[in-house]
Image (cartoon, rainbow, N blue to C red):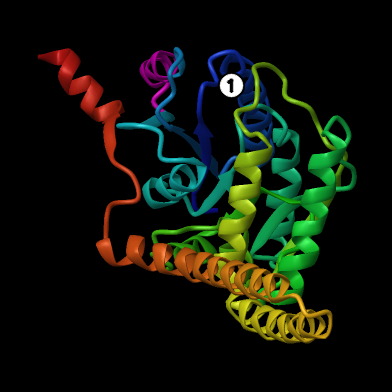
């Protein structure tokens, strides 16, 4: 049987505490797969997204110790979306796996994911959380609400509670890379490209070490970016709201005339019209801002170093 390469893509941001644990676990899993499937080979591609701790130093050591370990280090923090894109663009494998370094995406699922793909019935395997154990209740509420909202207003259905932990064929990876938009929302992109997907359910797992950099406001912005990227419903909503506020303003104006209060009438008109203009301008501004970023054609990330660049510098 011909050799097949699996690219393990790991976005990293301040992961110095968990990287040794991750390396041990991922090697245990992949070594077991190599024993079972001798035709399989692996490469491990880490994306250092502007970490401020010793993450880059650790990745340098890994690449020197084992040629299968590669890394890309950004010039600054560009975000996880850029990290996943860079990993996919620089992966060499017949298959690509994306997972986090914090072990909240259990590597032990990778063999099962591969077997589903190997069966020929699926092009992608991903995980779906059955619980949000350990997650703040407020965060869980807004997360569930986000999926309900986006699936009602978008033509692209996004399965609830799925993660970025995915095992994909090269065909699906190439389809994802063909979408070159600057404002990326990978959960939506994964769904939009289609392909046959198998969902593996699992209980939520807490970080093995370190502290998550995600917080409520970052997740809220991420959710809003997803809605803007995959739906024009907010623009329609602003029109509907404008009509409703106009009707409400007319009713209040009639009431103001009935009680002979000119001040109340002017106040109602100013508040409604001013609020309506600000809201509609804000919604339109978000779409305009996204368009502005697209047309500037800035790079989605900038590479400051990889294992080849580091080797050349070291040999000088």
- In percent of width and height, residue 193 lies at 57, 71
Q: Which residue is identified by label 1?
A: 23
Q: Is residue 161 left or right of residue 242?
A: right
Task: In the displayed orientation, state which residue is furthest to the front.
Answer: 260
Residue 32, image x and y in percent?
A: 68, 31
Q: Please identify the quarter of the rendering in which residue 101 is found.
A: top right
Where does residue 94 sit, x and y in percent of width and height?
A: 49, 54
The rendered magenta stretch, by its main secondary structure, is classed as: helix
Q: Residue at x 49, y 71 (%)?
A: 284
| 64 is within the stretch colored magenta | yes
Please identify the quarter of the rendering in which residue 108 is found.
top right
Q: Which residues are magenta?
A: 56-67
**Mark 1 neighbour class, 10 Å CA radius: few under 14, some 14 to 19, many 20 or more:** some
Q: Report the residue at 82% width, 82% height from top.
A: 255
Of residue 277 and residue 32, the one placed in the foreground of this image is 277
- Quarter of the figure with residue 309: top left
Tally of marks: 1
Could you tell me which residue is drawn at 9 percent across and 14 percent down? 316
Residue 214's place in the image compared with 300, above or below, is above
Q: Is 245 above or below relative to 270?
A: below
Q: Is residue 50 visible?
A: yes
Q: Residue at x 47, y 40 (%)?
A: 79
Helix, strand or loop under label 1: helix
């Amino acid at each position: 049987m011909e050799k097949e390469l699996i690219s393990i893509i790991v976005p990293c941001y301040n992961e110095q505490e968990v990287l040794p644990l991750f390396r041990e676990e991922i090697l245990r899993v992949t070594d077991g797969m190599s024993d079972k499937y001798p035709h399989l080979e692996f490469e491990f591609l880490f994306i250092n997204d502007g970490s401020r701790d010793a993450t880059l130093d650790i990745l340098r050591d890994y690449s020197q110790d084992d040629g299968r370990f590669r890394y890309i280090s950004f010039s600054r923090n560009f975000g996880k979306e850029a990290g996943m894109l860079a990993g996919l663009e620089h992966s060499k494998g017949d298959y690509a796996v994306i997972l986090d370094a914090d072990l909240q995406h259990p590597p032990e699922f990778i063999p099962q994911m591969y077997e589903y793909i190997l069966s020929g019935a699926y092009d992608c395997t991903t995980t779906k959380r059955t619980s949000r154990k350990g997650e703040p209740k407020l965060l869980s509420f807004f997360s569930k609400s986000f999926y309900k909202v986006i699936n009602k207003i978008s033509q692209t259905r996004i399965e609830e509670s799925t993660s970025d932990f995915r095992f994909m064929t090269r065909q699906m990876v190439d389809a994802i890379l063909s979408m070159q938009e600057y404002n990326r929302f990978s959960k939506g992109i994964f769904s939009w490209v289609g392909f046959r997907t198998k969902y593996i359910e699992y209980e939520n797992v807490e970080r093995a070490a370190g502290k998550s950099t995600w917080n409520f406001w970052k997740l809220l912005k991420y959710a809003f970016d997803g809605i803007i990227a995959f739906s024009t419903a907010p623009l329609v909503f602003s029109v509907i709201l404008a009509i409703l506020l106009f009707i409400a303003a007319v009713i209040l104006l009639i009431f103001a005339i009935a009680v002979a209060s000119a001040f109340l009438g002017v106040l109602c008109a100013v508040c409604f019209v001013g609020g309506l203009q600000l809201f509609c301008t804000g919604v339109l501004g978000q779409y305009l801002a996204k368009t502005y970023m697209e047309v500037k054609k800035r790079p989605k990330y900038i590479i400051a170093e990889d294992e080849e660049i580091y080797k050349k510098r070291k040999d000088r």
